Amino acid sequence: MAAIGSFSLLRNCAVTTRAFSNVRVSPRATSSFNSIKFLHPHHSQRSLFCTNAIHDEEASAKAAAASADSGAPTIFDKIIAKEIPSSIVYEDEKVLAFRDINPQAPVHVLVIPKARDGLTTLGKAEARHGEVLGQLLYAARIVAEKEGILDGFRVVINNGPGACQSVYHLHLHVLGGRQMKWPPG
């Protein structure tokens, strides 16, 4: 009964005390509360790394947004022009798909329109962009088939700094090769 009480206490503490991110229980723990150790989030190297990575990603997205409408070539324009090498997965006259250099899944491919035509974000899409938007989605399906993930993949579009869009040239992320979780972000 004492062990059940300790685990109930542990569960209640973990739920009500948000300041602690990690809980370690000694393998020899029975009924002793002293065998439970709480670690503050700042003591966890992983939590520090994740916090810094999130902050860096958000800062990069805000910086990219500041120059989104400058008309300057993006890194994707340079990849399309073959000025920067990439691992191309699919290409046709209007769309290019290539592997992400910072993959977030075993399969992570970016699909982009070859002509920006004002499509820096999905939020700027107009009726005249309907055809290329359809081609992007169809290309995502072709990529999924080529990569062997047609039975389970995710397509993501980050729109603006609030979604951490880092390149202002509309692009789709095709993710797969592992079990996707929900909710995604």
Image (cartoon, helix red, strand yellow):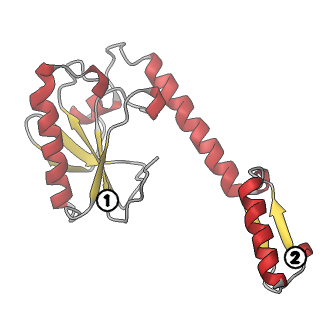
| Residue 156 picture location, percent across and down | 32, 43
Q: In the image, what residue occupies the spot 9% across and 41% down?
A: 92
Residue type for callout 1: Gly
Quarter of image, res 113: top left
Q: Is residue 74 above or below residue 48?
A: above
Residue hosting label 2 = 35
Is residue 55 in view? yes
Q: In the image, what residue occupies the spot 22% across and 24% down?
A: 116
Q: In the image, what residue occupies the spot 84% across and 68% down?
A: 37
Residue hosting label 1 = 176
Q: Is residue 69 left or right of residue 119?
A: right
Q: How many numbered marks does the figure carry?
A: 2
Q: CA distance from mark 2 to mark 1?
A: 41 Å
Disc 1: CA contacts within 10 A as few (<14), some (14-19) or many (>=20)? many
Q: Is residue 41 above or below residue 29?
A: above
Quarter of image, res 94: top left
